[in-house]
Amino acid sequence: MPMNRSLLLWSALVTVLIALPLVAQPVSVTVNGMSSGSTITQGDVLSWQITLPMGAVSFNELWVDVNTNGQADLGTDRLMGRFTQEDGVQFADGPGDNDGIANGVITTQFPAGIASAAWVFVAADSLSSDTASFTVLPLPSPAAQITGTITAPAGFDKSYILVEAKPYYEGGGGGGMDVFWQGLTDISGNYTINLGGTPTDMNPWRVQLTYQDLGRLVWLRRDTSVNVGGATPVVNFQLVLGTILTGIVRNTSAVPLEGAYPHTHDPSSINEQNQFGGNTGPDGRFSFAVPSGSYKLHFTREGYFDQWWNAKTSFDGADVIVVSGEDTIGGLDGTLVQGAEIRGRVTNYGSPTNASITVTRNGDSWMRNTYTHDDGTWSLTVPPGTYYVRFDKESQTIYYDNMYSPPGTPINISGTETISNVDADFSVGPPPPPPAPVILNIWDVPFDNGRQVYVRWRGSESGSPIGTDGPPLGIEFYTLWRWDPSAGWLQLERGEASHD
């Protein structure tokens, strides 16, 4: 008989429940404003709200509700992904808290290409958990499609395998919540991904299986890129029987860590090749399959220093695990040391952009480099000290806090705190054109050689004529633009209406 996911969480946390009084805010979750029964169409805005203790972390799971009973049932339903969210953290490697305020409520919304199916959202902290069920309907008029078939050894279930397409330039599976569309396989292993919007503008698309629990099955073809707009692309995948790697990830107090990400690398190069992995559950345990070969096992978790299997601290010094057809290789445990975290977001003219970040510690040679995620966010775990942050994009360099000369504003770290909003905004290349104004009235401006000035505002878009005393009643904000044939739209003035 399948075991309920909520019961599993409670059993895993029973010792904590006995030791601590239940005085904290219990976790609760709604999807699109409902605890159960909400319905959206692919491409619509998917939103959820998690209520939890102020500043706490929620450990979330997404399940395909195979038996459509509104619960996440182990052995029947399919776990499609785990991720964490912290109250007040707006930009993260994955969904963030939209309001960016540690107020006991995590709110998230984004246009979602999540697969058409019945789903269950699970949210939990160390004391409680809650679920919300919802249904995603298929895109009614897709602009393009990608199809294919997944093959597997005889006797293995090929249904409910999640296949995802993302624009190749967005990393095809990196962090952030960018454009993506998904499809699920049927009992024969066939799938169709429906793409909305204008997908030809985003060619090429990277097609891949998402990181999901397939037991001992593992896919050989990691990903591929295709163009849409002509004949429907066909992308097939092959699943083979692999060896399960399993272990437990703990902190230095021997407490299991949920949300860690153990994953493999090819021993010859720390790159995307031979990367297999899976997130740890509430008991800190992980389990994922790999084909025969040699691997280095890498443990990561936000806010902790990276570790490699067998207590190694670097890729070069990591031990190699040789896999040669075993059913399971166990005991691959890791212990992660918590550090402080510096994180922020990089933009170019206000829009997320790719950039490199260099963090140096004052007084010694300590230095680390990292790169932004697809949504412009970045983070780095550091030990105590005083740090300077440098941002590089093409030929431009910015030092925190948006300074153009070194070393910038220092950041002081004393323990395991998190320093947020270490941001930078570049102005590389020409600025994006402003949106064409909504033409509500033409106002002749004296001494402007007779050129026309258009009025655009947001708020109450009244069509009243604009007199010499300024915007009409009901206008909250106004912006004056002038069209210059050689420079495009030029913003002359923006202000707030001065009368009631």
Image (tube, helix red, strand yellow):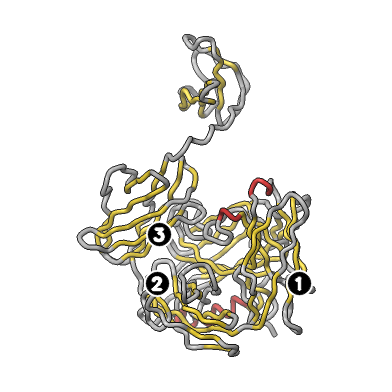
- Residue lying at 46% horizontally and 26% vertically, measured from the top left: 495
Looking at the image, is mark 3 or mark 2 nearer the viewer?
3
At mark 1, the secondary structure is loop
- Please tell me whether residue 342 is drawn above or below residue 304 in the rendered image: above
Q: Position of residue 411 (x, y in %)?
A: 28, 55
46 or 426: which is nearer to us?
Answer: 426
Q: What number is the disc on residue 189?
A: 1
The answer to whether residue 1 shows anywhere in this view is yes
At mark 3, the secondary structure is strand
308 or 318: which is nearer to us?
Answer: 318
- Residue lying at 57% horizontally and 53% vertically, measured from the top left: 169
- The residue that disc 3 covers is 370
- 303 vs 290, left or right, is left
Would you identify the image quadrant in which residue 243 lies?
bottom right
Residue type at the position of mark 3:
Thr
Nearer-N-terminus badge (3/1): 1
* Cα distance between the residues tagged 3 and 2: 13 Å
- The residue that disc 2 covers is 306
